[in-house]
């Protein structure tokens, strides 16, 4: 929503908005763009009647501003509808989907096309380092979009990505997530099958053929299909050549690439970006340059400080698979230090006990795990809620340290007292986590000054 607000502002629209919680990096981005953000919801925020109201998918009936818009019979739409009609129609649309890796992959593809001189439009649910903004609208034929499977709005329960008119649809992976709207894995697969149905005969479906949850969806004959993956017989396959600290050196088919990132999951993200670039007609030499100069995305394995030799990392991970991969990646990159993970159970899935077992396995790969309280726990029945005490006990039974610390101040103090130079602190949250990032950096600077 923030990225789209910035894009509309750049086209000359007057834009303002409301949100319950406003925090960096997007709050900073909006402020720099000159966009007024009201904290909380009140019909008085509207002022004069707007031409359009864009209602985000976190809004529901009972919200004061939503109720006022309905009473006044003002024009309103969902964010994906706005994107479709204002920004996508008539362009060559690349839609990047999947449970994991969407933001990084979308950012990579946009940067490759930029290096090729295509000057693409893009809409990304994060802040890519090469652009320092999540949205841009140009006169280019190309637009690259992060395609989310979450529902569109309270009045449209289809997945967002069905609005995005894909010429190229990318499916990185599929896992069960968003337990508040999907009943099971089959329901998640079904919504991805709806995306596949939208790919035209002159387009391309690029899908992870090594993912057992994706493979059954690929037997279609109404559009071209190419498979990618790190294992098996795929049209595009990546092979690691060297994993020097901080750089991935790998081969895709006959070409070699260097990427200044860590983690096998990022090699997979790069693999599909390279495959997409081939469809777009980008020479391999340009793709190699783009890979070498890719600057990553904020909150994706982002090093936010190294006070006293302690590496503090901010990451958006909130699904057990993503958490496990992050910890494994950090273990390989920093073999001599302890791995601390700080996790906020905030998403609609991790607040529930659906991934109770999977979270035990994920966090057991870290040396120390500090858990915040379950977000909005009063909205869940006790029998549905993630059982933090049981989670801690199970992790400790595996010989690791684990604690629940509800306050961000308490958590920052715990980290500052216990870490040693060479340790890595990974802060995992899809929200603000009570400002624990800044508090930890401040405490560490005091300790090691």
Image (spheres, rainbow, N blue to C red):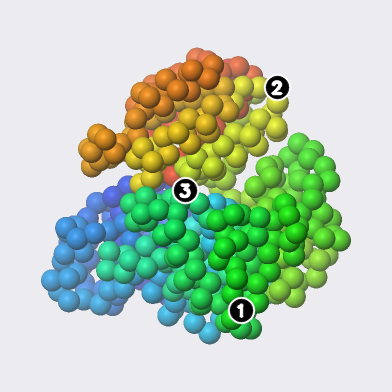
Q: Is residue 117 visible?
A: no
Label 1 and label 3: CA atoms lie apart by 43 Å
Task: Indicate whether 167 appears above or below 161.
Answer: below
Write the residue at 68% across / 42% down.
263
**Tag 1's secondary structure?**
loop
Residue corresponding to mark 3: 25
| In this view, the mark in front (1 or 3) | 1
**Tag 3's secondary structure?**
loop
> As rendered, which of 15 and 273 lies closer to the eye?
273
- Earlier in the chain: of badge 1 and badge 3, it is 3
Please say if the residues under marks 3 and 2 sit with CB atoms less than 8 Å apart: no
Q: Is residue 59 left or right of residue 218?
A: left
Residue corresponding to mark 2: 336
On-image quarter of the C terminus: top right
Badge 2 crowding class, 10 Å Cα cut-off, few under 14, some 14 to 19, many 20 or more, is few
Write the residue at 73% across / 47% down.
260
Q: Residue 108: horizontal and vertical position, in percent?
A: 65, 59
Residue corresponding to mark 1: 221
Label 2 and label 1: CA atoms lie apart by 51 Å
- Earlier in the chain: of badge 2 and badge 1, it is 1
């Amino acid at each position: 929503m923030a990225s789209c607000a910035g894009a509309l502002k750049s086209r000359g629209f007057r834009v303002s908005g409301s949100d319950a919680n406003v925090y960096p990096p997007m709050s900073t981005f909006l402020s720099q763009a000159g966009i007024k953000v009201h904290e909380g919801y009140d019909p008085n925020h509207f002022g004069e009647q707007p031409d359009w109201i864009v209602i985000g998918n976190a809004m529901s009936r009972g919200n004061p501003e939503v109720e006022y818009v309905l009473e006044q019979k003002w024009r309103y739409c969902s964010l994906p509808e706005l994107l479709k009609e204002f920004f996508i129609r008539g362009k060559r649309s690349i839609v990047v989907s999947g449970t994991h890796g969407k933001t990084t992959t979308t950012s990579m593809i946009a940067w490759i096309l930029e290096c090729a001189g295509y000057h693409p439009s893009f809409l990304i649910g994060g802040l890519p380092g090469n652009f320092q903004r999540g949205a841009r609208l140009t006169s280019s034929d190309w637009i690259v979009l992060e395609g989310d499977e979450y529902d569109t709005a309270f009045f449209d329960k289809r997945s967002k990505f069905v609005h995005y008119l894909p010429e190229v649809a990318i499916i990185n992976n599929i896992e069960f997530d968003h337990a508040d709207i999907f009943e099971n894995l089959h329901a998640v697969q079904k919504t991805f099958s709806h995306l596949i149905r939208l790919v035209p005969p002159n387009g391309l479906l690029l899908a992870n053929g090594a993912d057992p949850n994706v493979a059954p969806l690929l037997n279609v004959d109404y559009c071209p299909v190419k498979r990618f993956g790190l294992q098996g017989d795929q049209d595009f396959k990546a092979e690691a050549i060297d994993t020097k600290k901080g750089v991935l050196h790998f081969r895709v088919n006959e070409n070699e690439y260097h990427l200044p990132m860590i983690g096998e999951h990022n090699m997979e993200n790069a693999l599909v970006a390279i495959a997409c670039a081939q469809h777009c007609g980008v020479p391999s030499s340009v793709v190699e340059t783009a890979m070498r100069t890719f600057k990553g995305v904020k909150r994706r394995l982002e090093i936010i400080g190294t006070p006293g030799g302690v590496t503090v990392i901010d990451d958006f991970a909130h699904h057990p698979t993503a958490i496990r991969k992050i910890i494994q990646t950090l273990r390989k990159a920093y073999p001599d230090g302890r791995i601390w993970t700080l996790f906020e159970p905030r998403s609609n899935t991790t607040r529930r006990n659906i991934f109770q077992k999977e979270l035990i396995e994920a966090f057991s790969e870290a040396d120390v795990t500090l858990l915040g309280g379950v977000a909005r726990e009063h909205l869940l029945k006790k029998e549905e809620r993630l059982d933090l005490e049981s989670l801690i006990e199970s992790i400790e039974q595996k010989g690791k340290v684990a604690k629940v610390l509800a306050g961000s101040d308490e958590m920052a103090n715990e980290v500052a007292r216990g870490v040693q130079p060479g340790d890595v602190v990974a802060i995992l949250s899809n929200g603000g986590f009570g400002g624990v990032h800044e508090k930890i950096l401040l405490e560490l600077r005091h300790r090691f000054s």
